[in-house]
Image (cartoon, rainbow, N blue to C red):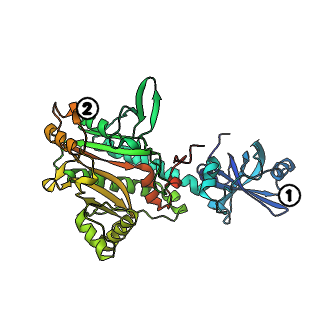
Amino acid sequence: MDRIHTNEVKDHDGKRVFVAGWIHEIRDLGKLKFLILKDKTGIVQLTLPKEKVPDEVMKVADSLTKETVVSAEGQVKGAKQAPGGVEIIPERLEIINKADAPTPIDTSGKIETDLSKRLDHRFLDLRNPKSLAIFKVRSKFYKALVDFFDKEGFVNINTPKITSAGAESGSELFPVVYFDKEAFLSQSPQLYKQTMVCAGFENVYEIAPVFRAENSNTPRHQTEFTGVDFEMGFIKDTGDIMDVIESMLKFVLKRVKEDCKEELALWDLEIKVPKKIPRFKMPEVKKWLAEKGKRIPEEDDFDAEAERMVGEIAKEKFGEEFIFITHYPVSKRPFYHFYSEGGKTTDAFDLIWNGVEIATGGQREHRYDVLKKQGAEKGVDLDEMGFYAELFRFGAPPHGGVGFGLDRLIQRLFKFDNIREAVLLPRDPDRITP
């Protein structure tokens, strides 16, 4: 008999089925025992009335521990009180691998466990149906991103994760041993995205690891995360990039809302698909903050508190969870951004979702002489950047793009306080295992 998953049991009422998974809960009422079996699709109840099941089945059931892997065969019966409205009366019950007891953390979700301890025993933590649901949603989110970019004609690229230099500050790079050469883990695919636009691909995207050697022990930073980056050629201005982002978020969130109803219900989460993401220049947003008592100097960026307040303002003023903030000061952006407003600001933006910045992007400067001048003003010699400098000497089109963190996208979707909840195996300055 072929195995079926627990979410299929309800379709086999009155039939004999074969199931397998982990023991989630054990309830012993003396003459009646209930076993809750779980697998990747959900749970099902095995009901064992002492007078109706074989003695060998009861003997096996009496020896079980939580998280033991078992298989069972039996008839499916309707049962209003059981999860899913059905139960299985097992005629055969076999232990495949018995779990030690007790487990180092609770896997039922009934006992709150410190996140750090849960991460120490992550594989057990993920047997909690709510924890598993996060990564089912994340998987659908990832798939929807790929489908969107493919639909829009973007070319998927895979860029090197061992590089000779960084895209921004060298202090944020992880050095690696690379024979007799100086090398680092990639902190951004930025330069390579631009390279492929100039190579003639025009529109490209990548979803891949990114590494930042920042000693940031915060609930929103990691030393390794999954970046979602895209770059577009022949744009008119940064508005083209924001248009694609808006379309992407609508597409992805609508898909996840439709495909993940059960997982979202476990978290009592309702996804709000944006209608129109507002776009405002930084000085105007700073005026809003000042009206609420938060004053930020003209040349300063937003801190975490300001972002949170901006998120609240977006909901109050526009009824949206997202807001674009544009025209950041030149002093707060790398030299390769396209300057606007007479060189006072950049044609760049940040995107805020539920009070946290989730993306930074903008138009890049594509004119060699202008780029060389902007680099010099920031202490960068463009001609020393090898292949990157060459891009702009042989026909670089107007282009721009954006970088997201997939982990932070999922964090904001679920409104988690800590980004580590949204990552299978997080990496930060203190955690390198498991």
Q: Which residue is mark 2?
A: 384
Q: Is residue 242 visible?
A: no
User: Tag 1: Cα neighbours inside 10 Å, few (<14), some, or many (≥20)?
Assistant: few
Query: Where does the image place residue 123, in percent across and percent down from the top left?
Result: 62, 47
Quadrant of the image for the C terminus? Answer: top right
Query: Where does the image place residue 1, in percent across and percent down from the top left?
Result: 68, 39
In-front residue for pair 356/53 = 356
Circles 1, 2 touching at the beta carbon (< 8 Å): no
Query: Where does the image place residue 172, in percent across and percent down from the top left?
Result: 40, 44
Q: Is residue 301 above or below residue 228?
A: below
Q: Which residue is mark 1?
A: 51
Q: Is residue 345 visible?
A: yes
- Distance (Cα) linking label 1 and label 2: 83 Å
* Residue positioned 36% across, 31% down in the render: 164
In-front residue for pair 10/202 = 202
Please identify the residue farthest to the top as the structure is shown: 180
